[in-house]
Amino acid sequence: MRKFAFSESGEGFVPPSTADFNLPPVFADNEFTTKPILLVIFSVVLISVFFIIASRKALVVPNKLQFAGESVYAFVRNGIGQEIIGHEFMRFVPFLFTLFTFILTNNVFGIVPLLQFPAMSHVSFPYVLAIFTFIVFHWVGIKKQGLGKYLKGIAFMPGVPKFVYILLTPIEIATFFIVRPLTLSLRLFANMFAGHLLLLVFILGGEHMLQGGIGLKLIAPFAFAFGIGMTFFEFMVQCLQAYIFTLLTALFIAGALADEH
Amino acid sequence: MTRGNEEGAMWSIFGYLISGLIIWGGIGWALDKWLDKNFFLLTGLLLGAGSSLYLTWLRFGRN
């Protein structure tokens, strides 16, 4: 837990830094019980319980909870799965749905009072998600087209003079095997990291100004107001990042399924 | 086509541009280090940028 900026150094404002993301273990010295890990576990429980309750008594005329659950499901199934992947989309819906709800819940934890930490601002979590996506879309492509044909489709663009392949093939291979999973995870990580840092700056800055002279005390509410405004902005970014991660996963799967790119 | 596909195309193009610069820029940089010259990095970056633009055109602009 961060100490108050003022008491930490006596004088002067200590700006929030990466140190604020390295939270100490909650239980004794067990490093598997840090806040992000507990939040991730909590999110899994929360998502499971919510969707089990929402779908347990499926009614023809849905109640509020069932309606909420079905809206999210329909959004992922129709808006992302069907629209992007096409006729084979149903077998990928569980994966896409899990990705979307998991990322969304963990992102929104960043602005839920008391929880207030997005686990995805630790880069390892997006890395693991991107590895899942990486394995799924390559596996789907290899299974559908065969290893040789799939790799050939990636590396050699049809309808190009042969000598141009020297230039293009390294780029294609790097894009599919390195840049795609890397940008996928880093985009999510950077957005969550920067967003959390931004909120820390405004709120801790306001808190610090409250302890200053009368002039600073008068400005402090503006910092808090900005912090609140930024919190709403963060909510938008958090939803958008969950959507983009899922959308790109669907697009990669669709690309791997297509015979010709 | 649909909005989702356009957004996807945008990110694919972004990926191509990045990897073109990294791959050919990286090769140029390595040649610079190895041969103790200073023009391979620029050549590589230009080559990479050009090739990734060409690749983008091949993938998305050829219909």
Image (cartoon, coloured by chain):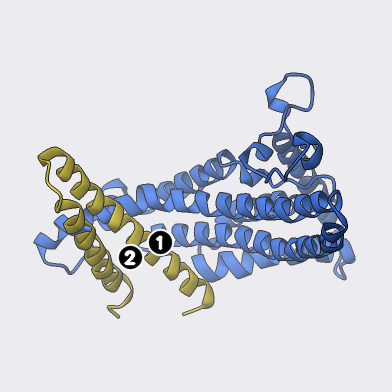
Chain colours: A blue, B yellow
Rendered position, A209 above or below A88: above
In the image, what residue type sits under mark 1?
Answer: Gly
Label 2 crowding class (10 Å Cα cut-off): few <14, some 14-19, many 20+? few
Which residue appears at 84% of the width and 60% of the height? A215
Residue A235, numbered label: none
Which residue appears at 42% of the width and 70% of the height? B9
Q: Residue A6: percent from the left, percent from the top? A: 79, 41
Labels 2 & 1 near each other (Cβ < 8 A):
yes
| Circle 1 SS class | helix
**In this rendering, would B24 be left or right of A230?**
left
Q: Residue furthest top?
A: A29
Tag 1, which chain?
A
**In this rendering, would B35 be left or right of A80?**
left
Q: Which is nearer the N-term, disc 2 or disc 1?
A: 1
Rendered position, A230 above or below A204: below
Q: Residue A247: percent from the left, percent from the top? A: 55, 62
The quarter in which the C terminus of chain A is drawn is bottom left
Residue placed under numbered mark 2 in the picture? A261
Q: Is A111 in front, or is A209? A: A209
Q: Residue A123: percent from the left, percent from the top? A: 56, 42
Q: Quadrant of residue A221?
A: bottom right
Residue A255, numbered label: 1
In the image, what residue type sits under mark 2?
Answer: His
Q: Quadrant of residue A254?
A: bottom left
Rendered position, A153 above or below A42: below
